Image (cartoon, helix red, strand yellow):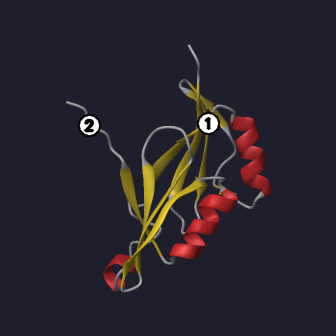
Amino acid sequence: MTRTIANLALLVADYDEAIAFYVDTLGFSLIEDTPLGDGKRWVRVGPGGTGAALLLAQADGPEQAAHIGDQTGGRVFLFLETDDFARDYALFSARGVHFLEEPRLETYGTVAVFEDLYGNRWDLIELKRP
């Protein structure tokens, strides 16, 4: 039996502004953007390679909108693993990504927390190689 986490739903305020951030700022690929009718879309973005994609889910109503940017109660929500921390940290900083801290060395690798356009917290991380 094979199972894979394929998509993670991420509440967003607007499909197009979210696509612009993830594609233009973080360098993700737009995997799919399919109209579903009534203004809804099936929008998937991802950093490339293997692994789960983000399903950008435009909030439907005030209850969902209240959770945009805080789907995890203020904890780091997503982890973007890179093969070159210094390269991506410099690139993201130059593109205006807001880092909440300076890069730090941990036993598992180099990491810094940043926020996406809605305030969701991410770890940019380069794991130590054995």
**In-image side of 63 versus 74 (left or right):** left
Q: Is residue 94 left or right of residue 64?
A: right
> At numbered mark 2, what does the secondary structure look like: helix, strand or loop?
loop
Q: Residue 92: image x %, image y %? A: 72, 52
| Dot 2 crowding, Cα within 10 Å, few <14, some 14–19, many 20+ | few
Relative side of 14 to 86, left or right = left
Residue 37 spot, x, y in % from top left: 36, 82
Which residue does the numbered mark 2 point to in the structure image? 3
Q: Nearer the viewer, residue 103 or 64?
A: 64
Q: Quadrant of residue 36?
A: bottom left
User: Residue at image x 69%, y 33%?
Assistant: 84
Q: Is residue 84 above or below residue 99?
A: above
User: Residue 67: which disc?
Assistant: none
**Left/right of residue 23 with respect to residue 67 in the rendered view:** right
Marks 1/2: CA–CA distance? 24 Å
Disc number lying in front (1 or 2): 2
Percent x, y for residue 79?
A: 50, 44
Q: What is the residue that sits farthest to the left in this orientation?
A: 1
Quarter occupied by residue 10? bottom left
* Residue 22, horizontal then vertical, whole percent: 60, 60
Image vertical order of residue 58 relative to residue 122, above or below: below
Whether residue 20 is situated above or below residue 77 in the rendered picture? below
- Element assignment for label 1: loop
Which residue type does callout 2 highlight?
A: Arg
Q: Quadrant of residue 62?
A: bottom left
> For residue 82, which numbered disc appears in the image?
1
Q: How many marks?
A: 2
Circle 1 packing at 10 Å, graded few (<14), some (14-19), many (20+), is some
Instruction: Please indicate, yes or no, whether residue 117 appears anywhere in the rendered image.
Output: no
